[in-house]
Image: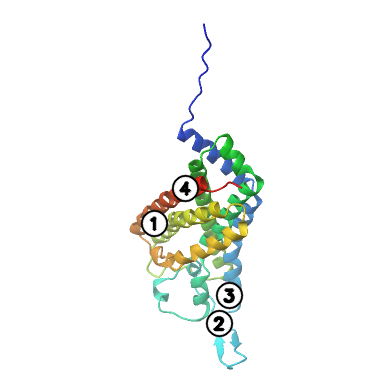
């Protein structure tokens, strides 16, 4: 009786599960991951405390002699977004906090994705991976999901740091008519919106491959095209509609740009 050799066909689900296991294990062992999450936690604390200490100080323009009074934050929620009563305020600390708030984490996520992917190509891991077992589609999906989790953790770390910074600086936690549910949905909406940015960063990173400097520069430039829309899409007064729109947009971008990333990997050299 002849011995019949059978080759088992590995399903897409098993391949993806294996790829995700490897990527998440590598992410959790990466020093860059912990450094970036720690930075996300420390940034709002330092910014809030420093801006509060500078509140009321006067700076003079040496050329024009015009004096500017620096206004520090008055409310802890300014690190997350603009409260309704502060919508018309200008100058001082609120302008700084309006630009340098939790939305900076979308750009910080670009650093993680670019370094994570460039290391794969620089070390030869990606070439070996595609040769031995993984498909390029699995790779793109896995990197997108790993980046999404990292970005969500950065947002959460920043939120915790912002609240702690508000306590240390003695700021008010008055919601000015908003509710705790609005804050939660604002944070969740930002997490889902992170998928849009992650998809852009993955596409640019797989195109740049081992050139981390190029992928970081391209990702930051590409992310800035959408960055100014983040406060409008995910305001402090977010509702379920904002969450649903961000989830839908994130999924559409992840699928669409993920397909483009897959094509880029198939059409280009892996070295």
In the image, residue 170 above or below residue 71: above
Q: Name the residue at 54% across, 37% down.
A: 134
Badge 1 density bin: few <14, some 14–19, many ≥20, Cα 10 Å: many
The secondary element bearing badge 4 is classed as: helix
Residue 256 is situated, as x and y percent measured from the top left of the image, at 41, 51
Q: Which residue is mark 1?
A: 246
The secondary element bearing badge 2 is classed as: loop
Gap in angstroms between the C-alphas marked 1 and 3 = 31 Å
Q: Which mark is residue 263?
A: 4
Badge 4 density bin: few <14, some 14–19, many ≥20, Cα 10 Å: some
Gap in angstroms between the C-alphas marked 1 and 2 = 35 Å
User: Can residue 104 be seen?
Assistant: no
Nearer the N terminus, badge 1 or badge 2? 2
Q: Which residue is mark 2?
A: 70
Q: Nearer the viewer, mark 2 or mark 4?
A: 4
Rendered image quadrant of residue 168: bottom right
In the foreground, 142 or 72 = 142
Rendered image quadrant of residue 169: bottom right
Q: Which residue is mark 3?
A: 51
The secondary element bearing badge 1 is classed as: helix
- Outermost residue, left direction? 241
Nearer the N terminus, badge 2 or badge 4? 2
Nearer the N terminus, badge 1 or badge 3? 3
């Amino acid at each position: 009786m002849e011995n019949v050799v059978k080759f088992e066909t590995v399903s897409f689900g098993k391949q993806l599960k294996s790829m995700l296991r490897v990527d998440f294990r590598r992410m959790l062992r990466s020093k860059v991951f912990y450094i970036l999450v720690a930075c996300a936690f420390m940034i709002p604390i330092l910014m809030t405390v420093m801006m509060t200490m500078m509140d009321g100080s006067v700076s003079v323009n040496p050329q024009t002699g015009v004096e500017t009074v620096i206004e520090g934050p008055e409310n802890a929620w300014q690190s997350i977004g603009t409260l309704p009563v502060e919508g018309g305020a200008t100058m001082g600390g609120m302008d700084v906090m309006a630009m340098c708030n939790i939305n900076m984490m979308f750009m910080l996520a670009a650093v993680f994705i670019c370094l994570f992917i460039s290391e794969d190509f620089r070390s030869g891991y990606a070439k070996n991976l595609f040769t031995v077992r993984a498909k390029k589609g699995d790779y793109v999906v896995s990197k997108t999901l790993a980046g999404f989790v990292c970005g969500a953790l950065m947002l959460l770390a920043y939120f915790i740091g912002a609240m702690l910074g508000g306590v240390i600086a003695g700021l008010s936690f008055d919601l000015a008519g908003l509710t705790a549910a609005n804050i939660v949905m604002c944070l969740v909406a930002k997490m889902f919106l992170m998928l849009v940015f992650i998809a852009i960063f993955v596409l640019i990173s797989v195109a740049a491959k081992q050139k981390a400097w190029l992928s970081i520069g391209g990702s930051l430039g590409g992310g800035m095209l959408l960055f100014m829309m983040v406060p409008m899409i995910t305001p402090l007064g977010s509702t379920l509609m904002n969450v649903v729109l961000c989830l839908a947009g994130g999924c559409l971008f992840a699928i669409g740009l993920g397909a483009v990333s897959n094509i880029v990997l198939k059409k280009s050299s892996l070295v």
